[in-house]
Image: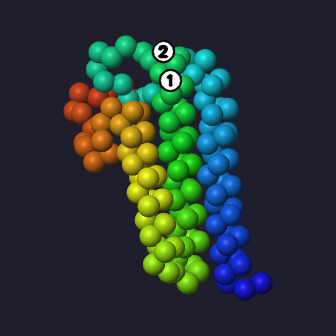
Amino acid sequence: MDFQHIIETVGRFMDFAGVAVMVIGALVSLPMALRGFQPRQLPAGAEPLSVYRSYRQLLGRSILLGLELLVAADIIRTVAVTPTFESVGVLAIIVLIRTFLSFSLELEITGRWPWQKQPANTQTASTAS
């Protein structure tokens, strides 16, 4: 078994893990939302989330984690084999698209961009007690 074959296998495993996280996250998020799951960080005075919004946030977090694993798999496979300008270009496009999706999901879930600080009036479970 040569190095390239091992890396290709690791990349496939990471792809599988990314897809599995999204599928399992979708299945686990539904009962959690139906039970009334609420995030720990709600802005002061905010109403509890509806089942729909709660499910969307939980599902979005699963998709975010799955996308991170898929990007890692693409990077592993592209860097491990002899990179060509074509393979690096394809990787760059894939990473750009997935990064845009991640930013969009983060904005949808938290209501702020990933680089923005958490609002000062948001209470966490540790500071609320």
Residue 37 % position (x, y): 53, 22
Evaluate whether residue 128 shows in this view.
Answer: no
- Spatial separation of the CA atoms under disc 2 and disc 1: 6 Å
SS under mark 2: loop
Disc 2 + disc 1, Cβ < 8 Å: yes
Task: Count neighbours of disc 2 (C-alpha within 10 A) and say few if under 14, some if 14 to 19, many if 20 or more.
Answer: some
Residue at the spot 61% in from the left edge and 42% down from the top edge = 22
**Residue annotated with mark 2:** 50
Residue that appears at 65% across and 23% down? 31
Identify the residue at horizontal 55%, vertical 65% (top origin): 74
- Side (left or right) of 41 relative to 27: left
Outermost residue on the left side: it is: 120
Along the line of sight, the residue nearer the viewer: 49 or 66? 66
Badge 1 amino acid: Ser
Q: Give x and y (percent) for residue 51.
A: 53, 17
Asked which secondary structure carries label 1, the reply is helix
Q: Position of residue 66 (x, y in %)?
A: 57, 48
Q: Quadrant of the N terminus?
A: bottom right
Q: Quadrant of the C terminus?
A: top left
Residue that extends furthest to the front in the rendered view of this protein: 86
Query: Quick check: 37 above or below 2?
Result: above
Task: Write the residue at 46% across / 52% down.
Answer: 98
Residue in the foreground of this view, choosing between 27 and 44? 27
In the image: residue 57, left or right of residue 4: left
- The amino acid beneath tag 2 is Ser
Answer with left or right where residue 78 lies relative to residue 99: right
Residue 4 visible in this rendered orientation of the protein: yes
| Residue 14 position within the rendered picture, expressed as x and y whole percent measured from the top left | 64, 60
- For label 1, the residue is 54
Numbered tag placed on residue 2 in the rendering: none
Disc tally is 2
Neighbours of disc 1 within 10 Å: few (<14), some (14-19), many (20+): many
